[in-house]
Amino acid sequence: MGVEAGAQAARSRALAVLRIRSRALAVALLPAAFAVVLYAGGTTGHLVGPGWHAARWTVTPLAVLVLTAAAVVALVVARARPAVSPTVSIAEESAPDLYRMVRDLADRLDVPAPSAIALTPDCDSWLEDRTHPAHGPPPKEERDELTGARGANRRATAAPVLVIGSPFLWWMRVGELRAVLAPVVAGTGPSAHPDIAAARRFVRGLDAAVAVSSTSGRCPLTRVVCAGVGWVARLLLRSCREHAALMERGVAAAAAERAQAVDYGLRIVAQEQVGLAYAGWDRLLTRVALPAWRMGRWPSRLDAGVVAALTELSRRDRLAEGFASRLGERPACDLLEEPGAIDEATSLLAARLFHGGPAERGPDWAPVDWQEYPEEVVDRKWRLDAARLHRVLDAQGIHHTPPPTALEPAGPTLSRVLDYLATPGLQPPAPAPDPDPGPAEAGAETEADADSEAEFDNERTATLAAALTTALAREEATAPKAKAPDTPPPWDDTTLPLFPLQPPRTARELLTDHVTAMVCCAAMDTAGATPGLDWLDGPTLLIDGERTPDLAPGVLSLIEDGDPIPLRHWLTQAGIRPEKPLRLV
C-alpha cells in the first residue's frame, strides 16, 4: 500500500466515522423535526383536528426529552478528558539537539513537526494528541497552520506530541534513534487532515465518556444519567470501532511507506536494537528494580542500568557480540542537556507505574544509586527477610536449643531454620490466635492457608509459608500510604500500579525468598561473603569476589521435600557455618 493509497483509505474510514456521528445527530433531531412539522401544519390549517392536536402534545415532550439527552451526551463527549499516557515532558531548552533532529526528520519527510517531545518508561514510541481543552492549549510557538484537503478551508491544528521510550535514548545510537523514529514522525502528516483529526477527536471523546460514566460515588440521579450517557457512548463506539481501526491502519501504512526513503538500511538494524532493549528493560525491572521498590527504594538511573545490563548480555552471549561494538558511537542520550536528571524523573515515573510508589521521594521512598545498591538494597533486603522469618518462628513457638557443648551465644541462626524444616516427624505447635484481626488480615490469612496447602505436602512448610504470607500482609497494611501529589497528573493514578510487573508472590515464593535470604546472611556473617548486583539476575551473593553457584536447588529441596542434605553440602563447600548467630535488622 503506497502513501496515497494508505492516506486515501484512512480518509475514507474517517468519513465513515463522521457519518456515524452525523446519523446520531439526525436521530436526536428527528423528534424535534416532527414537532416542527406538526406545528407548522397547524398554523397553515393543514394538520388540524383532535388527532393532530394530540400528536403535537405527544411529540413535543418527546422532542424536548431527546434533545436534552442529546445535549447532555454531546456535552460529556466534548468535555470528558481523554486518557493521557503518563510521560516525562522534555522542554526544548533541556534537549535542543533532540528537537533539532526531530524537526530535520520531519522536514525530510515533508510532514509537520511534533509539537513537543515526552519520554515514557517503556520500549515504545508513538504520537499522542493532547489538544483536548481539558489538557490545556499548546504554546503558541508549537501550533502549526495546517492545510486540509478541502482547498480554501484552513484550520489551526496543533501537531501531536512525540512520545519516545526512554530506554531507546540510552541504548541506541543517534542514527539508530533517528531511523526508529522516522515512521513515527511520518504519522504527523495524516494527523493534519481535518477529517482524520475530527474522527479521532470523536472516538477519543466517546472513550472518555465511557470512562466518566463508569465512575461511582455519585447520587442516584447522577448515576442514572451517567448510565444513560455510557450506554449511548458504548453504542456509538461499537458502531464506529471497525472504521476507526481501519482508519488507524491506513494512517500507519501511509506513515511507514513515507518513511521508507529515510535511513532504510539503518532502520532494519535499529529494529534489532528495539527487541534487545525491550528484553534488557524487562529483565532490569523484574530482577533489579522490583526488589528495591518492594523495600521502599527506587533506583534513580534505570535507563543507565539498561546499558549496563545489555552490555553484560553482550559479554555473555555470542549472538550479541556485535552489539557491544556500537558503544563507541555517540549515544542518543547525548542529545539531552542533563541526561541524569531526566533519567531520575523517568525512573521515578517507572516506579509509580509498575509498582505504585509515591509521587515524591521521602524517608520511606528514597532513591538509590547503583554504587549503593548492594549495600542499601541487597544486604538490607536479605536481613529484613531473615528477621521476618525468625519473628514468624518465634510467633509459632519454635525455639532452637543449641547442643550443651555449644559455646556460641544465643541468637538467630540458620540451623534453627534447617532443623525445623528438616524434621518431618514432629507436629509444629498451633500458633496463638491473633486478637481481633482486621478484615484485610483475616482475608490474607485465609488465602495464605489455602495457597500453602495447595503448594506443599509438608505440613511444617505449609504452616510456615502461611504465617509468612500473613505477616507480610500485615506489614503492607500498616505501611504508610502514598502521598497524593500536590498537582494531580493528567492521567488517572487512582489505581496504581497501572502496569504491575508481576502478580503477588505465592506462599511458596515467599518462603523460598526468606530461606534464601537466611542463607545469604549466614554467608555474609560467617564466610566473609558480600552482597552484589548482577545486571541480568538482580541481587547476588559474592564469595571472594566471585558469584556463588546457584543455591536454589538446595533451598527447594529443603522446603519441598524436607531434605537438608543438598543445602548442607552447599554450605560446607562454601565454608558457611549455620550454627553461628547472625546479625539481623
Image: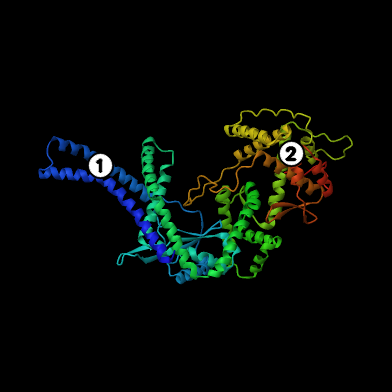
Q: Left or right: 245 with respect to 125?
A: left
Q: Position of residue 491 (x, y in %)?
A: 48, 51
Q: Left or right: 94 with respect to 60?
A: right
Q: Height in image: 499 above or below 336?
A: above
Q: Position of residue 358 (x, y in %)?
A: 56, 48
Q: Residue at x 40, y 47 (%)?
A: 238
- Say if mark 2 contacts mark 1, CB within 8 Å: no
Q: Quadrant of residue 217?
A: top left
Q: Height in image: 74 above or below 336?
A: above
Q: Residue furthest left?
A: 45
Seen from the viewer's position, the closer of residues 216 and 249 is 249
How many residues crowd mark 1 within 10 Å: few (<14), some (14–19), many (20+)?
Answer: some
Tell me the amino acid under the disc marked 2: Ile
Q: Which residue is mark 2?
A: 559
Q: Residue furthest front?
A: 1
Q: Height in image: 63 above or below 532?
A: above
Q: Residue at x 64, y 59 (%)?
A: 305
Q: Which residue is mark 1?
A: 64
Q: Position of residue 447 (x, y in %)?
A: 62, 34
Secondary structure under the numbered disc 2 in the rendered image: helix
Secondary structure under the numbered disc 1 in the rendered image: helix
Mark number, residue 528? none
Q: Left or right: 380 with respect to 360?
A: right
Tell me the amino acid under the disc marked 1: Val
Q: Quadrant of residue 198?
A: bottom left
